[in-house]
């Protein structure tokens, strides 16, 4: 029972919904709002059904989640997840500056490489703003960062015995 920091007291990702409305607007001011468990101090009960930690993906696919906060030049940032059998599986680019984005996808089991890139070569932190990223697979954190030059890679799959990273 109680509150989950990502989903608050409901079945919606409260912080992502707040960030979306805050960044894109909806015709009225949302004011000073914290989201998550700090949103409703007087709330004490859990939702009627608790949210799952991550959604079930079909077959042998796995759940990929990216949290990305862009720096002052969001248009320079792009990312992709690749597999040896299919090449680029998912990707993202064209982000606004200084915004937070959450990407959630079911990806094939051999999609093992996440690469984030900055076209200007100054990463997403810390010379032109304080951007950052964090990636998870099946709710397990696989990597995080922001200080790199042109690109940084995170391995999403465990290494096979005898293999080197």
Image (spheres, rainbow, N blue to C red):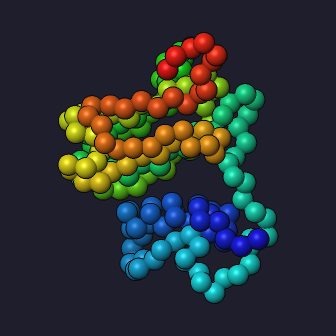
Residue located farthest toward the front when viewing the structure as drawn: 162
Look at the image and tell me whether residue 96 can be seen: no
Residue drawn at (63%, 18%) of the image: 160
Residue 109 in the image, given as x and y percentages of width and height? 65, 26
Residue located farthest toward the bottom when viewing the structure as drawn: 42
Number of marks present in the image shown: 0
Taking the image as shown, residue 76 lies to the left or right of residue 46, namely left
Residue drawn at (75%, 29%) of the image: 59
Relative depth, front residue between 111 and 145: 145
Quarter the N terminus occupies? bottom right
Residue 91 in the image, given as x and y percentages of width and height? 45, 33
Relative depth, front residue between 87 and 71: 71
Taking the image as shown, residue 112 lies to the left or right of residue 59, namely left
**Residue 52 falls in image quadrant:** bottom right
**Residue 7 falls in image quadrant:** bottom right
Residue 141 in the image, given as x and y percentages of width and height? 56, 43
Look at the image and tell me whether residue 132 can be seen: yes
**Residue 26 falls in image quadrant:** bottom left
Residue 29 in the image, given as x and y percentages of width and height? 38, 78
Residue drawn at (45%, 43%) of the image: 144
* Residue 154 position (above or below residue 144): above
Residue drawn at (48%, 74%) of the image: 34
């Amino acid at each position: 029972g109680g509150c989950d920091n990502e989903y608050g007291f409901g079945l919606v990702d409260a912080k992502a919904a707040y960030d979306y409305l805050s960044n894109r607007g909806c015709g009225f001011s949302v004011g000073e709002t914290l989201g998550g468990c700090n949103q409703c101090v007087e709330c004490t009960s859990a939702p009627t059904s608790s949210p799952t930690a991550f959604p079930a993906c079909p077959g042998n696919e796995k759940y990929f989640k990216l949290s990305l906060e862009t720096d002052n030049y969001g248009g320079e940032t792009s990312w992709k997840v690749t597999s040896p059998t299919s090449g680029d599986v998912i990707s993202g680019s064209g982000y606004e500056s200084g915004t937070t984005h959450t990407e959630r996808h079911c990806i094939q089991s051999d999609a093992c490489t996440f690469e984030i890139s900055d076209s200007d070569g100054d990463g997403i932190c810390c010379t032109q703003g304080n951007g950052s990223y964090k990636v998870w697979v099946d709710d397990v954190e696989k990597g995080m960062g922001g200080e790199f030059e042109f690109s940084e890679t995170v391995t999403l799959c465990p290494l096979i015995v005898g293999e080197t990273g």
